Image: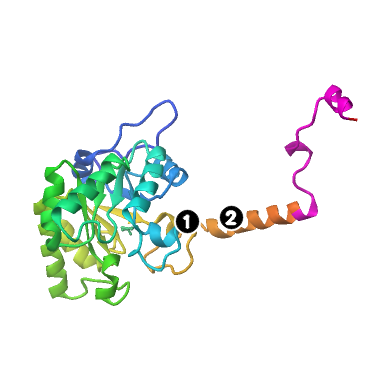
Amino acid sequence: MSSHPSPSPQTPDTPAKPVMVPEILAAKGHRKLCMVTAYDYPSAQLADQAGADMILVGDSLAMVVLGMQDTLSVTMDQMLHHCLAASRGCTRPLLVGDMPFLSYQADVAEAVRNAGRFLAQGRAGAVKLEGGREYAPQVKAMVSAGIPVMGHVGLTPQYLNTLGGFRAQGKTAASARAMLDDAKALEDAGAFAIVLEAVPQETAALITESVQVPTIGIGAGNATDGQVLVFHDLLGLFDRFVPRFVKQYAQIGPTMAEALRRYCDEVRSGAFPAEEHTMHLRPEEREKLV
Ligand code: KIV
């Protein structure tokens, strides 16, 4: 790993070249790829300024932003609304829109139309979908239409009811081999990268070595070609549950809560707004009032 330098965060004078699919493909074996989710203008801007290669407008939006119990009820329109907002804060990273439940499963034509909406209306540069070989026809048709597709195998939260919960996958040799077959089917269909979620490191390593496209891990150890984390998880903004594989790089939630508490206290005590937050009439105007 190394001969390709890691991108440096952009500065105001050097607008960085937008990351596109060929750069993601070329990174495999040379440098680790960094992806993070974001769901609006400020979060995308922060991820962009931090130097992320890809920003995922994940359907995790349903849980961490919209407060839903799982990801099954978020709609295409909600995803597009947030994707477009994130696109305004995303100048360098490749913006990936996550296809919500039932936006691609029913048939290929509907899948292509919905994926196309992410590019046309959400201003994404690619889409992601959950599932393996069963969606190879959808992936192939999207790629033929000029829509780059990222696959996602392992723990696929849209299969919550089939999997019996948010459970690690690929824990036996047989299931690891089945996951590898899925990853290969996605690659053969034209996927440019594959997310591996909640799988043992050995399973992730097998898949990473066996496909030519980058693998992006979340709870898959460090043998993958890149990593992704959910914005709210890594910043300590979502505490309903914290998966074991999440590293909280900060605890922004309590800091925000404390700031809001102080604001409420100061409004009640009259300490805010103070003189420096206050504007006054010019004296001649004040005189005319009395
Ligand atoms: O929706 C999401 O945030 C995701 C990532 C966890 C990969 O799919």
158 over 38 or under it: above or below: below
Q: Residues within 10 Å of mark 1 (few under 14, many from 20)?
A: some
Helix, strand or loop at disc 1?
Answer: loop
Picture residue at 50% right of the left edge, 56% below the top? 250
Q: Distance between the residues labelled 2 and 1?
A: 11 Å
Helix, strand or loop at disc 2?
Answer: helix
Is 286 colored magenta in this rendering? yes
Q: Which of marks 2 and 1 is nearer the N terminus?
A: 1
Using residue 9 as the reference point, say whether residue 140 is left or right of it: left
Identify the image quadrant of the C terminus: top right
Picture residue at 12% right of the left edge, 49% below the top? 141
- For residue 256, the mark is 2
Q: Which residue is the extreme one toward the right? A: 290
Picture residue at 27% right of the left edge, 40% below the top? 120
- For residue 94, the mark is none
Rendered image quadrant of residue 30: top left
Q: Can residue 210 be seen in this view?
A: no
Q: Which residue was labeled with disc 1? A: 235
Q: What stretch is highlighted in magenta?
A: 268-289
Rendered image quadrant of residue 24: top left
Picture residue at 47% right of the left edge, 44% below the top? 42
Question: CB of residue at label 1: within 8 Å of ligand 1?
Answer: no
**Residue 253 image point, x, y percent:** 54, 58
